[in-house]
Amino acid sequence: MAVYTRVEEPELRAFLSAYDVGEPIALVPIPEGVENSNFRLETSFGRFILTIYEKRVDPVDLPFFLGLMMHLAERGLPCPLPVRARDGSMLRELKGKPAAIVSFLEGKSPKRILPRHCAAVGAALASLHLAARGFPMHRANALGLSGWRALLAATRARADEVAPGLGDLLEAELAALEASWPRELPVGVIHADLFPDNVFFEGERISGLIDFYFACEDILAYDLAICLNAWCFEKDGAFNVTKARALLSGYRDRRPLSAAEIAALPVLARGAALRFLLTRLFDWLNRVPDALVQPKDPREYASKLCFHREVRGPGAYGIG
Amino acid sequence: MAVYTRVEEPELRAFLSAYDVGEPIALVPIPEGVENSNFRLETSFGRFILTIYEKRVDPVDLPFFLGLMMHLAERGLPCPLPVRARDGSMLRELKGKPAAIVSFLEGKSPKRILPRHCAAVGAALASLHLAARGFPMHRANALGLSGWRALLAATRARADEVAPGLGDLLEAELAALEASWPRELPVGVIHADLFPDNVFFEGERISGLIDFYFACEDILAYDLAICLNAWCFEKDGAFNVTKARALLSGYRDRRPLSAAEIAALPVLARGAALRFLLTRLFDWLNRVPDALVQPKDPREYASKLCFHREVRGPGAYGIG
């Protein structure tokens, strides 16, 4: 993730004095990502990630995110384990900002996504949904259906700068989804952002599920619909039904989907495409000229949205 | 650790169905150790250790041991992290015995112990003592001073079978220690068995502190005295003061020792030597002819005990 905050050695030593993570050896900024400042922290006890939370993350949400990571890591999922300071706290302050240390996970995001990656992600997502069942904290999805109207209002006027007719498309699409959004499907804690850059592999095996800073409670199958969008389209925009089938069957092997969940996949996939279209559009229209990270092109998700609008049923995803 | 219990695949699958650790790939028995049955469990999410607790471990103590490991692992120490089942429990049942899954730690015990290993162990022990401060559970040291009288009673009559005069030595030594044992030193949670085979290294770095099944509350400096015995003697029985100095200064860099703690090191080291002498003697006298694991020769600790009896002060350990 982008590094916005610099940390000097005396500040690091003062910060670490509240922890029992061993002696610091190195602190290396990690340039990827957009939300926070991340560093690889190496100590005499091993490798960790130090994160300083920048202004895009609401500090009120941090106990939910860190608590969820701990809940899942304690259950054997390959998630970062937040490190507690000696006083038990998981969240402290560095350079006047909230900061946390989590365990380092080995592995790499897949460069070229194959159906077997999709199957493994489906299975991991099901495990995440099952393991999160007992997690006691709550967080509504700020970027769920009820948040899209405000995002549309913030982007509508200039949407056509990105693609002619995009404003009307968004308007019509949101109205349609508000009318048809499923209300009775199983809900629970979802990752809500399980894109390929948030999944590490070591060989065939998933070795890391990271970036829980959009996690919230919402429809479980909506999380799967986000993954259909994130994992099953080719770079040229073509939908790969083999990957979708692998993703869905990986998931269903571990957590069976009800008939209602399967039937809702097309509308959930449209919703997921709209959500990323809206946030990318917002970031695109509000980009800072000298930002370290370029915003992603929103048109990728306009194209995905159009695909899901044309879908006649869950069979298009290789299921049902 | 020795494997006493066999686990077939259907039993493993049934056991794992309560967890979210992914699909089992392999279960490989680990032959080292003496107390429990251990297996390396490989799943689609990574590697774990599955332990089945055999009759030498009192099930009543298991929540303390597992809770402590979790407390320390959560604080960034390289300890095994117990894996919770979906219902939150860390302890379940397999083949009618208590069983737990913990995270797998990379690294190896040092084959040839160097002073730098001793320094790293001292620092890690201090971190363990500091990080354990807030741990809320309690366990008295069953193998502490108050337990030695019973061990002596169980071994006294046949002690001289192992070495002529050993019974009288034990008798005299226990009386001396009961009279001189320090009463005012800082106490806390101690590992109580931090031998080289319970410490893993990756290069220069400690990557694993394992086997918490003797952990308890006792004098903190007694834990250091156990390490003096376990890490600072050569195979020929010679005491290596360079290693002792490295161990103690590694510890003191992180947790300073009081003058009283330093002054007590010789008597604590005698106590630690007596403790391992008594338990090894008990195991030796009660060994089973066809056991998988041969008991260790108790005379090694008789020799260490005699060294500490001759010590005139903490200077013999390179300190004070």
Image: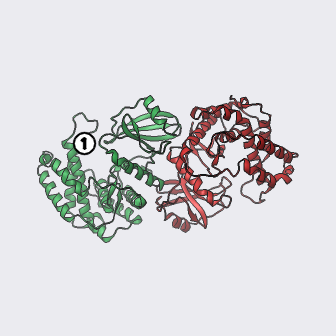
Chain colours: A red, B green
Q: Position of residue B199 (x, y in %)?
A: 38, 50
Identify the residue at horizontal 27%, vertical 68% (top origin): B263
Quarter of the image for the N terminus of chain A: give it.
Answer: bottom right
Identify the residue at horizontal 67%, vertical 35% (top origin): A261
Instruction: Report the residue that reaches farthest toward the bottom.
Output: B259
Quarter of the image for the C terminus of chain A: give it.
Answer: top right
Q: Using residue A257 as the reference point, say whether residue B282 is left or right of it.
A: left
- Which residue is label 1 attached to? B295
Question: What's the amino acid at mark 1?
Answer: Pro
Q: Is residue B116 above or below residue A256?
A: below
Identify the residue at horizontal 43%, vertical 38% (top origin): B40
Question: Of residues B305 and B78, which is closer to you in this image?
Answer: B78
Question: Of residues B177 and A113, which is closer to you in this image?
Answer: B177
Number of other residues with Cα within 10 Å of mark 1, as a class: few under 14, some 14 to 19, many 20 or more: some
Whether residue A39 appears in this view of the structure is no
Q: Is residue B252 above or below residue A34?
A: below
